[in-house]
Image: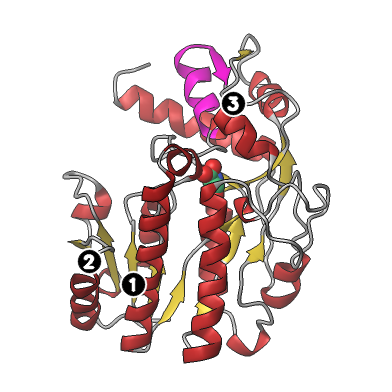
Amino acid sequence: MKKVLVTGSLGQIGSELVTRLRKDLGLNNVIATDLRKIEGSPIVEEGVFETLDVMDQEAFLKMAKKHKPDMIVHLAALLSATTEKNPKLGWKLNMDGLINALDVAKEIGAGLFAPSSVAAFGPDVDFQNTPQDTFMHPTSMYGVTKVAGELLMNYYYTKYGVDTRSVRFPGLMSYKTEPGGGTSDYNVDMYYQALLKGEYECYLKAGTYMDMMYIDDAIDAIVNLINADSKKLKHRNAFNLAPFTAEPEMLATSIRKHIPNFKLNYKIDPVRQAIADSWPDHMDDSAAREEWGFKAKYSLDDITEVLLRELTIKFKKQGKL
Ligand code: SER
């Protein structure tokens, strides 16, 4: 992989992936794109940035032909809670965007990475050790788009030879972008509010387990998978990734090691609770470990330390602390 085009590059994953790829490949070999252009953002200002609507197939192809990437990382998508509020829009954006990205990759002979999610599973799987290959019967529209996306990527691989690669991400934890739109992102918001207010009102019940992962481990995973030897990959749908499982009280306990008076309250959002209840508690990620050497470095307490430290710096700069 020498030159990468990233869609949705101002989002939670994109903003950190672009920074990493610019370091690895050089500024001119990373084409960051997004529907929006945020003036002042380092993603926009510090390298190649283009506005791109992934729903516009013609514009997408034109841009790809201009820059000639050998890999497209397609991140533009709606998250689970936003999709559940507007299922048809979620279906349209997530599916049309992906098939456009696949067609562009096919046309220019590039590989394609697009993430799937823990949301691709439904309530009929083993929640404690969800296998790599099992039933895929999600009950959220976001999950439906993720399963359909996995199948589509597999189809383009077998039918057209497009080098597709994917992972099922758990709830990602990071500090650079604002939380919102997902079901798992209480795991970011709790840290924001712990510092700003000393308390947090959680929209998921205590005991709602799901896998979690630090953003640097997620970025390493993408970089390692897109660089992995194609012959070693048996799975072309999407690899389970699950460094650790956690629930709201565990995050609060970890935060209290730094902010002893932190209070966790609950006000359940039935939409997001239903989505979270339909997801596995913990996936089996041995296929990712075996086929391309996946390994995560950060534990929950490591992440808490980084998030509280970095968010303090960010809030002080913004005059919020
Ligand atoms: N973390 C995402 C969400 O909550 C799922 O992939 O929407």
Quarter holding residue 43: bottom left
Q: Amino acid at mark 1?
A: Asn
- The percent coordinates of residue 257 (x first, y second) are 68, 21
Label 2 is placed on what type of residue?
Asp
* Distance in Å between CA atoms under marks 3 and 2: 35 Å
**Circle number at residue 119:** none
Is 89 situated left or right of 276 in this image?
A: left
**Secondary structure at numbered mark 2:** loop
Side of 253 where 268 appears, left or right: left
Q: Does dot 3 land on a helix, a strand or a loop?
A: helix
Residue at the spot of label 1: 100
Measured along the vertical axis of the image, is residue 219 above or below residue 250? below
Residue depicted at x 25% and y 78% = 64
Residue at image mark 3? 270
State yes or no: discs 2 and 1 in contact (Cβ < 8 Å): yes
The residue tagged 2 is: 56
With respect to residue 215, does 253 lie above or below?
Answer: above
Mark 2: few/some/many CA within 10 Å (<14, 14-19, 20+): few
Q: Earlier in the sequence, mark 3 or mark 2?
A: 2
Residue at left 23%, top 60%? 53
Label 1 and label 3: CA atoms lie apart by: 34 Å
> Crowding at label 1, few (<14), some or many (≥20) Cα neighbours within 10 Å?
some
Q: Residues within 10 Å of mark 3 (few under 14, many from 20)?
A: few
User: Which sits earlier in the primary sequence, circle 1 or circle 3?
Assistant: 1
Which region shows up in magenta?
Answer: 188-202
Count of all numbered marks drawn on residues in the image: 3
